[in-house]
Image (cartoon, helix red, strand yellow):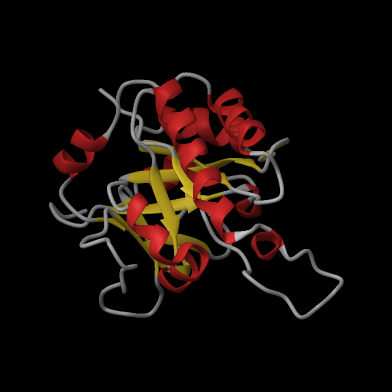
Amino acid sequence: MTDQNVEGVDVSSHQGNVDWSAISQDGVGFVFVRASIGGHQVDAHFASNWSRVGDAGLMRGAYHYFWPLTAWQDQADNFINAVGNLQAGDLPPALDLEGALASNDPRKPKGWLDVPIDQRLPMIHNWLNAVEQTVGIKPVIYTRQNFIEGLLGDGIQELADYPLWIAHYDVLQPTLPASWSSWSFWQYTEKGAVRGIIGNVDRDKFNGSLNDLKALAKS
């Protein structure tokens, strides 16, 4: 691990059982762990991953997958109840904004398409505010440039002061959404490999040194 662009991974139950001690010896400095999905579901591996990441000496953050057809209050409560109190050194919580804006398959839920555009930003803002007030640290937004621009239009400007975790694969530098001038985290591949995980895993970078990363964490 170099002084710049600290390497990380993000995981969910899709990765199965993870050998965190092996990961900590493979140049990884931080981990984001999926905590919750929508208003009622908690990731089946979250509790185990969350505690074992800390035991392995890795910096850890938790993220929530936002489901647009569920009340934001239920989603904020679901995340907060799953994660509990953040400890000093924990990374900011992250809100995962992704999914299909439209679907031509009537068998598939349309998700964000069923939410009027003027209701989307308030839902997101309310979740962010509720979580920040409870855990005491400003959340990170995970998204893709073309998704969030289509999702919010000009309303994207209202989120530009949140740290950005951008997903963009197979490029030298990620393309940023309008209103953001820099990224904090970059998910640069979904087909990464690391010791301790069988199969592919998302790989990430932090835009700064390890000391910068520690400064971003909860004090």
Residue furthest front as drawn: 118
Residue furthest right as drawn: 107
Compared across the picture, whether 112 is left or right of 153 comes to right
Q: Residue 157: name its quadrant.
A: bottom left
Count numbered badges in the picture.
0
Q: Is residue 47 visible?
A: yes
Q: Residue at x 41, y 58 (%)?
A: 155
The C terminus sits in image quarter: top left
Locate residue 6, reporting x and y percent: 24, 52
Q: Residue at x 51, y 45 (%)?
A: 122
Which of the pair 47/42 is nearer the observer?
A: 42
Locate residue 123, reporting x and y percent: 55, 44
Compared across the picture, whether 182 is left or right of 143 comes to left
Compared across the picture, whether 54 is left or right of 178 comes to right
Compared across the picture, whether 89 is left or right of 75 comes to left
Locate residue 191, reporting x and y percent: 49, 70
Q: Residue 203: name its quadrant.
A: bottom left
Which of the pair 183/71 is nearer the observer?
A: 71
Q: Is residue 194 visible?
A: no
Q: Residue at x 85, y 74 (%)?
A: 106
Which of the pair 84/21 is nearer the observer?
A: 84
Which of the pair 20/184 is nearer the observer?
A: 184
Image height check: is 84 above or below 182? above
Locate residue 202, reporting x and y percent: 47, 61
Q: Residue at x 72, y 75 (%)?
A: 103
